[in-house]
Amino acid sequence: GQNIDQPTEMTATEGAIVQINCTYQTSGFNGLFWYQQHAGEAPTFLSYNVLDGLEEKGRFSSFLSRSKGYSYLLLKELQMKDSASYLCAGTQTGANNLFFGTGTRLTVIP
Amino acid sequence: GAVVSQHPSRVICKSGTSVKIECRSLDFQATTMFWYRQFPKQSLMLMATSNEGSKATYEQGVEKDKFLINHASLTLSTLTVTSAHPEDSSFYICSASRLAGGPNEQFFGPGTRLTVL
């Protein structure tokens, strides 16, 4: 089965750092995606982790621990435009469909 | 590269009519396309997976006779919502992947907002 959990809402201040957590229980787990989605728009790719550890990409970093079934997305130097939903999605070995969490709606305040 | 388009972006229709949504991969061949539905403030729910030239695989609870999917070419998949009702009003998003089999990145279309009156 597939079960992916994220907090539904978070609020953070402009210029700060925020960490969005995602825990998963996925049979045959292969890797984990993070997507950003602004209201009424399609998701856009942020990161894909297969191996344990932290991957940094500009202001955004993503971490994966396969043994703990845990991932997080770290956003630094928050900007107002970062207000969006952040979707965690798992993949299975041998399959190419994604299993999405509920998404975390992040609100950045001045 | 890896651009996916959807048409139309918005559609309003009367209850009982059918609506066709197109999903195209513009600069790559998509052997697999996915159709998702998203209700307000909820995440994406996979409806079906379609592979070029074969029948779509529907997720549990999705009526295959109501949501007809055709993936006739490597760049085009269509979703037809037949006899639409107000509860079918939602944001429909397609995505495409470049390789058949194995996990890989999906490229999402901009979505189609369907409103059934």
Image (cartoon, coloured by chain):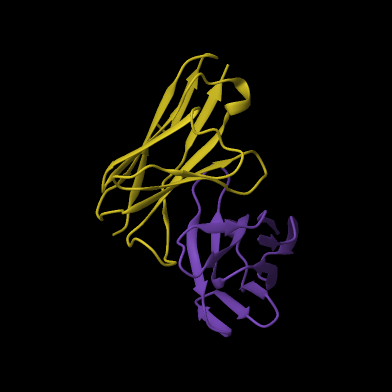
Chain colours: A purple, B yellow
Is B100 placed left or right of B58 in the picture?
left
In front: A34, or A74?
A34
Q: Residue furthest bottom?
A: A53
Q: Quadrant of residue A103?
A: bottom right
Residue that appears at 48% across and 43% down: B93
- Where does the image place residue B19, in percent across and percent down from the top left? 43, 24
User: Can you say whether B51 is above or below A99 in the image?
Assistant: above
**Residue at coordinates 49% horizontally, 21% vertically from top-left?**
B12
Q: Quadrant of the N terminus of chain B?
A: bottom left
| Vertical comparison of A2 with A31: above or below | above
Q: Residue at x 50, y 76 (%)?
A: A58
Task: Tell me which residue sits at (69%, 61%) in the image.
Answer: A3
Residue A5 at x, y = what percent? 72, 62
The vertical placement of B72 against A65, above or below, is above
- Where residue A49 sits: x, y (%)? 52, 76
Horizontally, residue B88 falls left or right of residue A16, namely left
Percent position of residue B58, x then y? 50, 43
In the rendered image, the quadrant that contains the C terminus of chain B is top right
